[in-house]
Image (cartoon, helix red, strand yellow):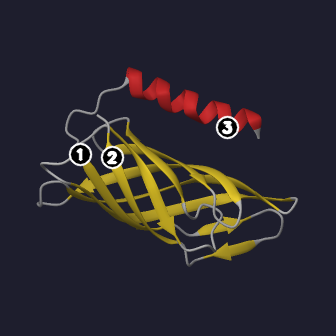
Amino acid sequence: MKRVSITLPVILCCMFICQRAAAQDYRFAAGIRLSNSSPTLSSAISGKFFATDKTAIEGIVAWGNRFGIGALLEIHNKFNTPGLSWFYGGGAYVGFQDGDTYLGPTGIVGLDYKFTNAPVNLSLDWKPELDFLPDINFVPDAFAFTIRFVIK
């Protein structure tokens, strides 16, 4: 657990320093994700970093019914509306509750909007999860709204 909590921020910081996203409305944003309590990655702190103009990495640290950490690789596709894009992707998570460890893959599909004249990013998504541990369990009802402050 300690290795995961140290490795994820180090990777995100290195990518933040070393990469440049030229055509994106923002490069890095962090904020609050509000979700229902069913998934491991429910209500959480979310950070999104664009490694390229279409590819983002989102890190999530959740505090809902269980503590969880996850990362997603997301592909963004712009609409004709400035600041609006849709995205899809996948990743993995690990969570802990009452002595049990929850582990599995997760997918994501959603909408992302960056206000033109304000450092605010909004996101609405569906992120189903598939627990491999402690038991196999599909969690399809993982919807969330995220508000982030654009840092760069």
Residue 5 got which mark? 3
Q: Which residue is mark 2?
A: 149
Precedes in sequence: disc 1 or disc 3: 3
Cα–Cα span, label 1 and label 3: 27 Å
- Label 2 secondary element: strand
Which class describes the residues within 10 Å of circle 1: few (<14), some (14-19), or many (20+)? Answer: some
x and y percentages locating residue 128 in the rendered image: 56, 70
- Labels 1, 3: front one: 1
Q: Residue at x 55, y 78 (%)?
A: 141
Do the numbered discs 1 and 2 sit on residues whose CB atoms are within 8 Å?
yes
- Labels 3, 2: front one: 2
* Quarter occupied by residue 152: top left
Cα–Cα span, label 1 and label 2: 6 Å
Do the numbered discs 1 and 3 sit on residues whose CB atoms are within 8 Å?
no
Q: Residue at x 21, y 33 (%)?
A: 22
Give the total of numbered labels. 3
Precedes in sequence: disc 1 or disc 2: 1
Q: Amino acid at mark 1?
A: Pro
Which class describes the residues within 10 Å of circle 2: few (<14), some (14-19), or many (20+)? Answer: some
Q: Amino acid at mark 3?
A: Ser
- Residue furthest right in the image: 99
x and y percentages locating residue 55 in the rendered image: 36, 43
x and y percentages locating residue 143 in the rendered image: 48, 73
Q: Amino acid at mark 2?
A: Phe
Q: Which residue is mark 1?
A: 119
Cα–Cα span, label 3 and label 2: 22 Å
